[in-house]
Image: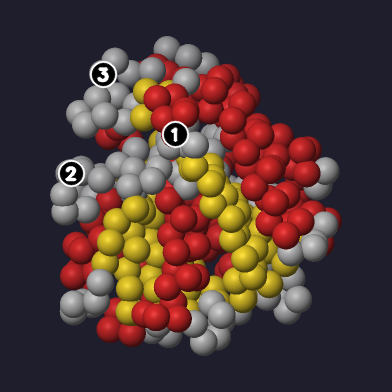
Amino acid sequence: MAFLKSFGSYLPSRVVSNDELAAGLNCAPDWIREVSGIEERRYASPDESTASMAVAAAQQCLERAGLTAGDIGLFIVASGSSERRFPGPAVTVAHQLGAGQAPAFDLPIASAGSLFGMALAATLAEAHGHVLVVASEKMSTVVAREPVEPGVAILFGDGAGACIVSPGSGPARILDHVLHSDGAFAEDLRLEFDAPLAMNGRSVIMQASRKIPSGIAEILERNHKPASVVEVFLMHQANQNLIDRVARALEVEPAKFYSNIRCYGNTSAASMLIAAAEWWQNPGPRPGQIICFAAFGAGFHWGALLAEA
């Protein structure tokens, strides 16, 4: 049995508004908001990396849990924008936190990496004890690569989120999870080394609009729960229009889908954990509440995780 113990996040201090971004992309600020729901995003400074942001989010998560890095038995770090081929940021994050020789591994899964990390943590917590899952992305450097595509550049921001999954106790028990992958669409959303992000927007939106609701419906059906009993949906913050589509597909009021994309944009794998960290603090889980996490990302990878407070 595994529990969600705490969440944490880190957002860089630099705020980039639609007005600022539009001026360099030769587009209208209102158009950015209409197509994405985004009004501003955060950009990391040149001396901030995926690892340094991950460490900051992890430190907040540990503090909220009342734990130290020495209490963590396993580190999982998800990032699709890591600065080098190897080693990935996981070992750096664990070392900078002061973890000693606890195992640490990377999940190079954009957007859905945090969900896959949480699902793995739920399975591995019994063997390793407290598992720290961190997702960190520095997408601002990716979307700045030439040739800059305005339809891509407007979407992304930087940040990191963290979660501790524990085997003993916590505010919410993980009930179940479902994970899926389909490599038939791998070319539709990809990032080559030192190349701009390549995205077939039509394919991504179409597949996400189908696969996220199907993943949520699958886990709810498997656990004999209607969508109406879910108190909050904590989803990857890709696009506000996509979030609204998922709500309609599930016939759930949009207000149940927590959204902070207006402030931070799409922070890829970090976005779901950043949203969860905010919701966990206010209003936070109450006894008996059903919470559903969901994500979709490059690969394509997607899935859902169900928890009960």
Q: Which mark is residue 183?
A: 1
The answer to whether 214 appears left or right of 251 in the picture is left
Tag 1, which secondary structure? helix
Dot 2 crowding, Cα within 10 Å, few <14, some 14–19, many 20+: few
Q: Quadrant of the N terminus?
A: bottom right
The disc labelled 2 sits on which kind of residue?
Arg
Q: Position of residue 220 (x, y in %)?
A: 74, 57
Do residues under tags 1 and 3 come within 8 Å of each other at their CB atoms? no
Q: What residue would you read off at disc 2?
A: 85
Callout 1: 10 Å neighbours few (<14), some, many (20+)?
few
Q: Residue at x 25, y 72 (%)?
A: 103
Q: In the rendering, at what x and y percent does residue 306 appear?
A: 64, 63
Q: Earlier in the sequence, mark 1 or mark 3?
A: 3
The tag earlier along the polypeptide, 3 or 2, is 2
Label placed on residue 215:
none
Q: Label 3: which residue?
A: 146
The answer for how far apart the CA atoms under marks 3 and 2 are is 21 Å
Question: Hey, what amino acid is under mark 1?
Answer: Gly
**Looking at the rendering, which quadrant does residue 158 occupy?**
top left
Tell me the kind of residue under disc 3: Glu
**Which circle, 1 or 2, is nearer the viewer?**
1
Q: Is residue 151 visible?
A: yes
Rendering coords of residue 285 (x, y %): 67, 72
Q: Secondary structure at mark 3?
A: loop
Against 221, is 211 above or below? above
Disc 1 + disc 2, Cβ < 8 Å: no
User: How far apart in space, not on screen, are marks 1 and 2 (Cα)?
Assistant: 21 Å
Picture coordinates of residue 75, whole percent (x, y): 32, 69
